[in-house]
Image: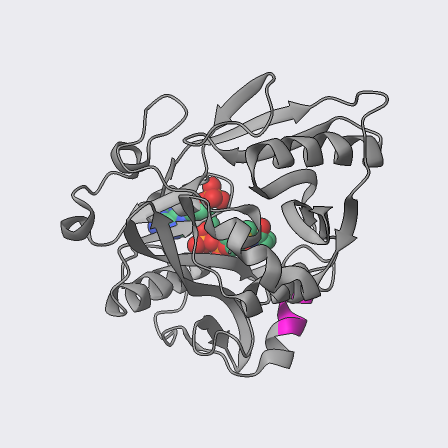
Amino acid sequence: MWTDAPLTRESLALPEPCVDYPALESFLDHEFDGVPGIAREFPLLVGVRNPGRSLVQRERGAIVSHAAWKRVELVAGQRRLSAAGIGLVTTAAGERGRGLATRVISSCLEAALREGMDLAVLFGKPSALYTRLGFVAAGRERVVQVPLESGTPTAGIRCGGPEDAARLLPLLESHLLRVSRSAEDFAALLEIPETRLYQLECGGRPEAYCVVGKGRDLGGVVHEWAGAPAAVAALLRGVAALEARPLPVIGPEALAAPVAGESRVGPLAMFRVLRPESLGSDDPVELFGDPETPARLPIYIWGLDSI
Ligand SMILES: CC(C)(COP(=O)(O)OP(=O)(O)OC[C@H]1O[C@@H](n2cnc3c(N)ncnc32)[C@H](O)[C@@H]1OP(=O)(O)O)[C@@H](O)C(=O)NCCC(=O)NCCS
């Protein structure tokens, strides 16, 4: 196990896969942030779509800590990278600070290495927990603000839902930087509560789409957009008009900004290289850059794919 975390009980069993999803959901409802329903916001991470990769630490039979991982294929032009996306790291409130999350994340990393993943990625805030486990903030994500302008046309823009996933997928797939996603997975992601899909249509065909919000995350932010550049720009201006507010839009810094305007670059996520022999470095910043460092190997994870 990759940890020297202080454990108060030497006899603790190793974290194990959890198949009791109702018990897991109840644990997450109580312990993640106290607001029920978090598992529904990660439909591809926990539950029947990703069996065996929710790892829990139990004590006296009860779940006291959890982390899940899923396979993520990063598309970087012609190159494919296999990543373990780790999420829903949660320890029971009364058991924190004992190294339990360190243990369950370490078990996820070991499993990911066994399954041949090149790297691990998570979207938590940088903290001692993650840096002690070798994670480094890296990657380059741009935020640009779409202004609210009076008189902006909104004709042709309509809301959508999971039923639109299959016809929108080719637009996403035209991006050089993305995560591989099936139409079924796309539909499941569009079912996440508080996720708004807008599309710009011409003659019944989608020219561009964008997604605002994702559960309790990314509220009010456009975190995925695709289509012909002029159509994306028209859609984003129209969505700002429909929502009657300036619209923050995030996207990969390595691609052209979807609209002109003031922008800033921040890190994409926290990464740990698992197989440096495959990637040519064990330093995520050298590979994927950071706000100050250009990327040698640009990658991007759109908001719906953020574990
Ligand atoms: C974040 C969370 C999962 C941490 O769980 P935990 O079991 O307390 O984690 P650990 O005990 O392994 O580590 C906690 C701290 O102890 C420190 N620690 C653990 N082992 C250590 C050691 N051997 N030496 C020094 N410090 C150590 C960690 O670095 C970490 O420090 P930090 O609080 O500054 O980040 C828990 O607080 C939680 O469930 N929060 C709510 C849900 C959430 O926000 N999850 C993260 C987003 S996905």
Is 247 on the left or on the right of 267, as rendered? right
Is 150 on the left or on the right of 60, as rendered? right
Residue 18 visible in the picture: yes
Residue 14: percent from left, percent from top: 36, 74
- Residue visible at 32% across and 61% down? 109
Rendered image quadrant of residue 169: bottom right
Considering every residue shown, the one lying at the far front of the view is 203
Is 114 on the left or on the right of 205, as rendered? left
Residue 118 or 81: which is nearer the viewer?
81
Residue 74: percent from left, percent from top: 37, 52
Considering every residue shown, the one lying at the far top of the view is 262
- Residue visible at 72% across and 58% down? 34
Q: Which residues are magenta?
A: 25-30
Residue 260: percent from left, percent from top: 59, 20
Q: Quadrant of the N terminus?
A: bottom left
Residue 105 or 305: which is nearer the viewer?
305
* The magenta stretch spans residue 195: no
Residue 204: percent from left, percent from top: 72, 54
Where 169 falls versus 175 (above or below)?
below
- Residue visible at 53% across and 27% down? 257
Residue 23 or 202: which is nearer the viewer?
202
Is 87 on the left or on the right of 16, as rendered? right
Where 48 falls versus 240 (above or below)?
below
